Image (tube, rainbow, N blue to C red):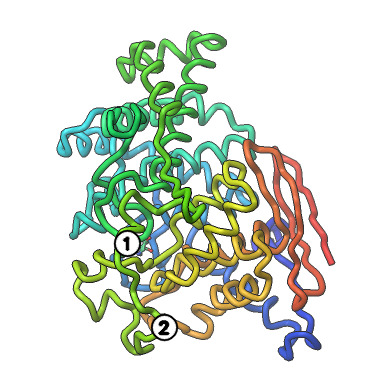
Amino acid sequence: EFMADFWRRSDIHILGNEAASGRDKYEMQQAMRWNLFQILQASGRAEGTGIPAKGLSGLAYEGHYFWDIEIYVLPFLIYTEPRIARNLLLFRHSMLEQARLRAQVLNQKGALFPWRTINGEEASAYYAAGTAQYHINADIMYGLKKYVEITDDKSLLYNEGAEMLVETARFWEDLGFYSERKGGKFCIHGVTGPDEYTAVVNNNAYTNLMARENLLFAVKTVTDLRDQMPAYYDTLVDRTKLDFDEVETWQKAADNMFVPYGRTLGIHPQDEDFLELEAWDIKNTPRDRFPLLLFYHPLVIYRHQVIKQADVVLAMLLFGDMFTDKQKKRNFEYYDPLTTGDSSLSACIQSVVASETGFSEKAMGYARYAMLMDLADVGGNMANGCHIASMGGTWMATTYGFAGMRDYNGDISFKPNIPRYVDELCFPLTIRGQLLRVSMS
Ligand code: IFM
């Protein structure tokens, strides 16, 4: 009964086109179901815990939790099992006190959630590709926003959510500064974005966009509480010692957020200096020298334009309404050849954006790579455990990618990009308590 209920809410029916692909038409179907089943194994009883990078399936990453939860797995859970999504957000909230202490250790105001943790304490061994990924704060708030928009669960927002929003907004406002050299824009320096092959940089586009979203969501939530729900507002002030003047500083930082843009190439540089770096000769790097991190010193990698995992490309999925179609295409064309995919978190996102920008063959290739990642052991590291984030990503590659779903501010739309290798695609979505069945062919 439990499993029947799970499939009713979560199953993705995807039928391949044998003639076009030359492959068994059930290959994708089996792979998708296997992936979804593994996410269930990892998340089904997430009650007072997070979801480890490998679920419960292997020892790699020592059971630690990362942004994998909010950016890769939460979308699936929000649309199929919101109860678990809620638990996960509550779990983050239960670590807020430690996040406040962590911000103090880093000489910042507010709270900083740990990049990598199991008990609320930062467990990153290497700060450049760990602690410096400040975007974790905004990733969690992005997950909260999507959860609230799709479920309409305001109680979580007004109680635990608002408190996390205040502390994370405080953190961003304190971390950045108004740069005269940038015409007074709000800049955030010395951070690492999602791409772990480019570390400790100024104005990482992804981080700045995420921070802006975090700040604006905090402004809206706190203002709504003050104007419409004074009892909640009083409790919030009591818990956070908030002074409403602070909220104006958050709005100002968001309004002035610097987002790098390179006019000559018409692309969004990953960060301020990214385009200055020497390009890595990926084509002439022997296959057996990947993943690069196992064969080259990080300082060598950091000196080059070479990308471990989707960064600007991920921003274009999360904030697709802030980029023009032309910019999306240009950015994708620029970053895709520089992306090694050395992180398992990349292929699924590249697939979604390839779908959107009209690179249907690439979209299919990346989706298949992600779907078969563990079944076919494409990275040769399956013995260390399942790649849970990528598994959540396979759900995104089909729903956001092939079906072209978008949910900006909770408004659901579809612009299908079904590849010629797929004949049928159907899936359920739970939206504000109702089950929607989507069917495309
Ligand atoms: O969170 C990820 C990170 O983005 C890339 N390295 C592995 C981590 C755990 O999956």
Identify the residue at image location x=21%, y=32%: 108
Give the number of the mark in front: 2 or 1: 2
Q: Is mark 1 within 8 Å of ligand 1?
A: yes
- Report which residue position mark 1 lands on: 196
Looking at the rendered structure, the kind of residue marked 2 is Lys
Position of the C terminus, as image quadrant, is bottom right
Q: Quadrant of residue 182?
A: top left
Give percent across and percent down for residue 59. Answer: 32, 72
- Report the residue that reaches farthest toward the front: 264
* Residue 266 in sight from this viewpoint: yes
* Quarter of the render that holds ligand 1: bottom left
Left or right of residue 387: residue 120: left
Q: Secondary structure at mark 2?
A: loop
Horizontal arrangement in the rendering, residue 286 relative to residue 386 (left or right): left
Mark 2 and ligand 1: say if the CB distance to the nearest ligand atom is below 8 Å.
no
| Residue located beneath label 2 in the image | 283
Residue occupying the point 32% across, 61% down: 196
Q: Nearer the viewer, residue 76 or 139?
A: 139
Q: Which secondary structure lies at badge 1?
A: loop
Report x, y in % for residue 188.
Answer: 30, 38
In contact (CB < 8 Å): disc 2 and disc 1: no
The mark found on residue 170 in the picture is none
- Give the image quarter of residue 101: top left
Give whichever of 262, 435 is nearer the camera.
262
Q: Position of residue 237 (x, y in %)?
A: 36, 14
Q: CA distance from mark 2 to mark 1?
A: 20 Å
Amino acid type shown at disc 1: Glu
